[in-house]
Image (cartoon, grey):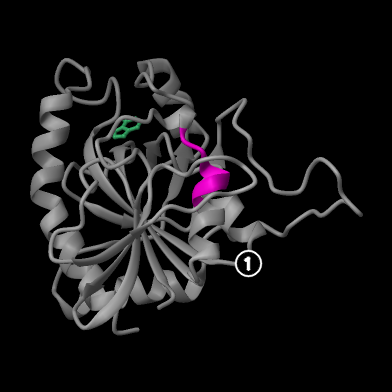
Amino acid sequence: MNLAIIGGTGLSQLEGMTEIRHQVVSTPYGEPSGPVTIGRMGGHEILFLPRHGYNHRIAPHEINYRANIWALREMGAARILAVSAVGGISAAMKPGSLCVPDQLIDYTWGRPSTFFEGDLESVTHVDFTHPYDPELRAAFLEAGAALSIPMIDGGTYAATQGPRFETAAEIRRLSRDGCDVVGMTGMPEAVLARESDLRYASLNVVANWAAGLQGDGRVDMDEINRTLGIAMQDVRRLIVRMLQY
Ligand code: HPA
């Protein structure tokens, strides 16, 4: 059992997974978002942890990312598939699309974002040139091809602080910076996985056009929830398929 799923907005429960047990894990960094679920899906054992908690109560900037990654590693995870809802910035990223990003820019601040601090024997600087694991990304894309689920290969993810959505000017800036999608939870999750030697890739579910881009430009939570409800069915099929790799 080495595959773990981190669920985001719209994926607080993993339908189709038979739950075997829940494990409360205590970590040097405090409490994870909840007990880790050990489950069975498509004949394989997997781990599942919803980053906002099972009741979707933990805001993006208050998630204990270090405890979550620590807990999954402690439970034997070697590979993490992170699912997250995003806003679409570039033209290809229309609501309902699935994107497997290959780059990110971190705009978050004030989040504990490294394991390598405090009482250290020596300073460690991890390589983060390619923030997502290429093999896991390829497996995601292969799974999409096998299931005829269209997926966008590559894109730059902007991690913003939240919990508010962005202003129209902020989105214009992210666009100038070369960002294709925007979400609030991709960092420091990705770098903590890298620091822990865990393979990590992300599946971005485009839930809405980012602020200022369409219609009256506002971001509407009802629209987001509707779009996610539909797209998550494909996400579940993709996860089942990924279990074979
Ligand atoms: N911005 C930031 N995070 C998001 C968005 C958005 O527009 N949609 C879903 N998560």
User: Whole-percent x and y of residue 56?
Assistant: 27, 35
The quadrant the N terminus occupies is: bottom left
The quadrant the C terminus occupies is: bottom left
* Magenta stretch encompasses residue 65: yes
User: Whole-percent x and y of residue 124?
Assistant: 82, 54
- Dominant secondary structure (helix, strand or loop) of the stretch shown in magenta: helix
For the record, the magenta segment spans 63-68
User: Whole-percent x and y of residue 76?
Assistant: 50, 71
Q: Which residue is mark 1?
A: 197
Assess disc 1: are there few (<14), some (14-19) or many (≥20) residues with their C-alpha within 10 Å of its C-alpha.
few
Query: Going by the image, does 180 lie left or right of 144?
Result: right
User: Whole-percent x and y of residue 27?
Assistant: 58, 49
Above or below 156: residue 60: above
| Amino acid at pointer 1 | Asp
Above or below 172: residue 113: below
**Residue 136 visible:** yes
Above or below 66: residue 211: above
Q: Quadrant of ligand 1?
A: top left
Element assignment for label 1: loop
Q: Residue at x 42, y 24 (%)?
A: 162
**Residue 144 visible:** no
